[in-house]
Amino acid sequence: MNKNNRNKKTVVSLGHNALGYTTTQQWDAVKVTARTLADLVEAGCQLTITHSNGPQISMIHKAMTELRRLYIDYTPAPMCVCSAMSQGYVGYDIQNSLKAELLSRGISQTVSTILTQVTVDPYDDAFYEPTKLIGRNMSSDDAEIERKKGNFVKEIPGKGFRRIIAAPKPIDIVEIEAIRTLSDAGQIVIACGGGGIPVIEQKHALKGASAVIEKDAIAGKLAGDLMADQLIILTSVPNVYRDFGTPDQVNISSLTLAEAQKMIEEGQFGEGTMLPKIEAAIAYLTANKEGSVLITSLDAAADALKGKAGTLITA
Ligand SMILES: Nc1ncnc2c1ncn2[C@@H]1O[C@H](COP(=O)(O)OP(=O)(O)O)[C@@H](O)[C@H]1O
Ligand SMILES: NC(=O)OP(=O)(O)O
């Protein structure tokens, strides 16, 4: 056990690899993911877990939309409802797998999922320039139907068309006090899944928005709001690289905020992939200068906790 992690309040962000892309893949993937999460618990981390939902919300949205073809009186579910469904579905699998994995190690802990809403600004530029790909590949005819409904579509070379929706910046996590209460009580919480259900404040009510919040952005916000000791981003690469994907690619084992900012300016991070993770690190470390961010893969997490892998970002 690494004593340095004893009772460290830790936000863990899970990417696509942790969940797979289909129901059966997710079933298998979460069992592997649960082992890494249980290793973190055994290393003394007090976990609050958040996760991606791109493939899941796409699957749910597709199912809820395609029913219209079979049943003329069927009303498709709006994106915010699909987002809520994805949180329930992914949370359900993670909480049961993690609880079972912990029990197999003799650890009995409550793991629960909090359906989480996150407020967004209705005038966020993202609503005018959507960037987040969702849903199935469509023919040009189907894409035209979507356009006529007022939806945005993007051509993906060689694959057809896909819907793109807004990824507005998260403002406030509506259920943050519930998350904090459970976390402070030492319980494992799954929250803000898929970036959180985006909602717009309207007087005393919250109205669901047709958007998907970037899960890395909410991970940074959640870690900052909880004043977590560390944010661990588990993704598909063991660490961040300089000159990624080129013959000059080199591992980066540690970064300061200033170095990370400079690398952003150099265009070192892929948009929609590594860039939002680095931006999340900056947002969190700006809120908690004493914290640290570890970016690594599920496989390398145990070594990364011992300082033998991963990229550690500090203020
Ligand atoms: N500088 C970089 N260092 C490491 N990975 C990078 C870098 N720039 C872009 N990437 C890409 O970021 C990916 C991880 O982001 P992403 O695919 O969105 O995963 P996740 O689903 O875990 O969020 C890596 O697989 C890699 O292709
Ligand atoms: N909500 C979100 O950012 O999910 P993905 O990482 O799966 O795109």
Image (cartoon, rainbow, N blue to C red):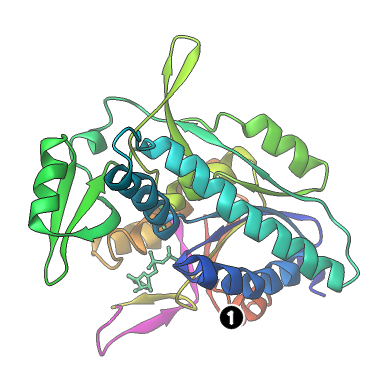
User: Where, quadrant-wise, is the N terminus in this rendering?
Assistant: bottom right
- Residue 249 horizontal/vertical position (percent): 32, 84
- The residue lying toward the viewer, choosing from 145 and 119, is 145
Count neighbours of disc 1 (C-alpha within 10 A) and say few if under 14, some if 14 to 19, many if 20 or more: some
Q: Which residue is mark 1?
A: 299
- Rendering quarter of residue 4: bottom right
- Residue 240 horizontal/vertical position (percent): 42, 73
| Residue 43 in the figure: left or right of residue 145 | right
Magenta region includes residue 193:
no
Magenta residues, start to end: 244-257
Point 70% across, 33% down: residue: 178
| Residue 184 in the figure: left or right of residue 260 | right
Does mark 1's beta carbon lie closer than 8 Å to ligand 1? no
- The residue lying toward the viewer, choosing from 277 and 100, is 100
Looking at the image, residue 204 lies above or below residue 258: above
Q: Secondary structure at mark 1?
A: loop
- Residue 52 horizontal/vertical position (percent): 47, 56
| Residue 157 in the figure: left or right of residue 48 | left
- Rendering quarter of residue 76: top left
Point 37% across, 35% down: residue: 78
Looking at the image, which residue sits at the far top?
203
- The residue lying toward the viewer, choosing from 57 and 248, is 57
| Residue 277 in the figure: left or right of residue 38 | left
Specify whether residue 52 is in view: yes
Name the quarter showing ligand 1.
bottom left
Looking at the image, residue 250 lies above or below residue 77: below
- Rendering quarter of residue 139: bottom left
Specify whether residue 220 is in view: no
Q: What amino acid is at disc 1?
A: Asp
Magenta region includes residue 246:
yes
